[in-house]
Image (cartoon, rainbow, N blue to C red):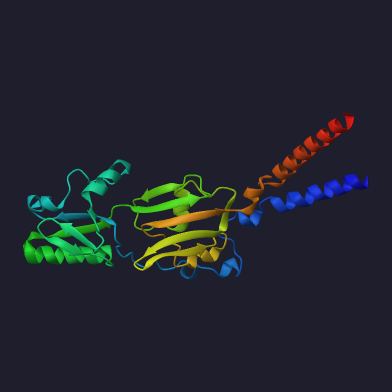
Amino acid sequence: MKNRLLIFVIILLVGLSSCIPHKDLVYLQNKEIALDSLSSNNLTEIQKPYRVQVNDILNIRVKALDQDKVTIYNPVGNENLNAESQERSYFDGFTVDIHGNIRIPVLGELNVLGYTTEEIQKMLETKLLEDQFKETANIFVTVKLAGLRYVTSGEVNSPGTQVLFQDRVNIFEAIANAGEITQTGNRREVMLIRQYPQGQQIHKLDLTDINVMKSPYYYIQNNDMIYVKPLKQKSWGTGVTGTQTITTIITVMGLVTTSILLIDRL
């Protein structure tokens, strides 16, 4: 009787220690302050404007009263940015080279490294008016990134390179687009690897904490890498819920018991 009780206690303890706690699966938990005292003003980090990096691809459009005069600046057949146009954006867009320059027809090289798209837009409008057109041409320039590209790896359901045609994407949108984090993914230590002029840096985000919305890394940037580490429960292989764990242990113990009985009969 004592042996049976001991076995039951062991199974219970192993099951409780190896299953994934509910608190490790829930996003945006209120861990420090009362939820009623939180507001959108003090929760959301103000997103800083993105500054162009090497290897970024810019989508530039120039419009004027006489559209024929600006066709040289506008790639043909790339008006709609959809899934099929990703490859065309690579060939028709303006890629920032290792020196931070893009090459524009007639205008030549233009350094855009470290500028925002709005700053590049004004720069192009000024340069076109100075070199090619008059004020009466009513030049209108738009500059956008040719898709926000980022990479997801680790414990996500659809790892790989993702492209979203949006100007603003937060970490939850980025992960949802990658098929969400698996049940065995560590939501407390999501690693965001970001490119900087001086090299790469790793930032850790706790997605289970509501204060993640105040993080300066809450919004992802072009060329970010998101890595989700596995929880230790995955390496144990006993199951991710208490029921799965206990079922696995009982099955193993049943096999062991049967083997011992068979050996004793020999």
Point out residue 93 in the picture as x, y percentages from the top left corner: 23, 51
Point out residue 89 in the picture as x, y percentages from the top left corner: 26, 48
Q: Tell me if residue 205 comes above or below residue 243 in the rendering.
A: below
Q: Is residue 212 visible?
A: yes
Q: Would you say 83 lies left or right of 17 here?
A: left
Residue lying at the far right in this picture: please name it: 1
Q: Would you say 12 lies left or right of 202 here?
A: right
Q: Nearer the viewer, residue 209 or 260?
A: 260
Q: Would you say 173 lies left or right of 247 here?
A: left
**Quadrant housing the C terminus:** top right
Tally of numbered discs: 0
Q: Nearer the viewer, residue 96 or 63?
A: 96
For the point 29% across and 52% down, the residue is: 146
Q: Quarter of the image holding residue 244?
A: top right
Q: Tell me if residue 162 comes above or below residue 123 in the rendering.
A: above
Q: Is residue 169 visible?
A: no
Point out residue 113 in the picture as x, y percentages from the top left corner: 26, 65
Point out residue 7 in the picture as x, y percentages from the top left corner: 84, 46
For the point 72% across and 43% down, the residue is: 243
Q: Quarter of the image holding residue 87?
A: top left
For the point 80% across and 36% down, the residue is: 254
